[in-house]
Image: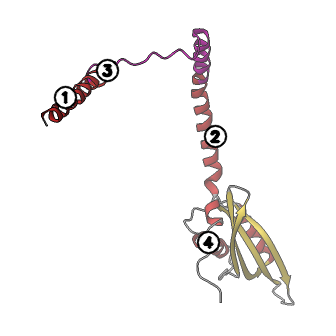
Amino acid sequence: MNFGTLDRKTAILWISGVAVILLLRFVVMADRSPSVVAASESAPMAEKRLARLRQIAATVPGKEALMKQAAGELESREKGMLKAETSAQAQAQLQELLHKVGQSNGIDIRGVEEARIKPFGSDYGEASVTVRFTCLIEQLVNLLAALANEPELLSTNQIQITGGPDKNKTIQVRLTLSGVVTRKLALEKKTGGGL
């Protein structure tokens, strides 16, 4: 029995000694210096790359000035766009504009026959409002001239003129007026459902 306990004690001492040696070797006395990495490119290649990057960096101020100029020009061109958050607001602006200009020319323009918004090119949308009214030919000419003088980007999309047997020479006009809006209004989903 004595012989078995001696072997166990010896085995435990041997295992403890090996564990201490491994601990000292790989943890305490481990080599902590970073490994040396070989250079991926030579000095002349690095100098060429640096020169190219300096050339690119030198063009940045010129490109920034060009971007500012283009942004200013775009802003001045988009000044005439209808400023609205929703398509209904854009159509209401067109209707209000028609009412105001019509009233200043002695034409009573009320109600909307048709209103729609559709994409206009790849960056904008087109809001349209169709109205009907009765007026004299001179009033119609003055109305169209006044609409052309408005600061908004407007266009007469469609115009139908019907004369009548009236001795006052009044005409019935169906006019579609369009204005430029942002693209997001043209892509806006219609709310509500059909029956």
Sequence-first tag of 3 and 4: 3
Label 1–label 4 contact, CB within 8 A: no
Report the residue at 57% width, 62% height from top. Answer: 83
Q: Which residue is mark 4?
A: 189
Is the C terminus in the top left, top right, bottom left or bottom right quadrant?
bottom right
Mark positioned earlier in the residue sequence (2 or 4): 2
User: Which disc is residue 30 wearing?
Assistant: 3
How many angstroms separate mark 2 from mark 4 (CA)? Answer: 32 Å
Q: Which image quarter holds the N terminus?
A: top left
Residue tagged 2: 70
Residue of label 1: 10
Question: Residues under labels 3 and 4: Cα distance?
Answer: 67 Å
C-beta proximity under 8 Å, tags 2 and 3: no
Say left or right for 3 vs 100: left
Q: CA distance from mark 2 to mark 1?
A: 87 Å
Asked which quadrant contains residue 102, the reply is: bottom right
Q: Secondary structure at mark 2?
A: helix
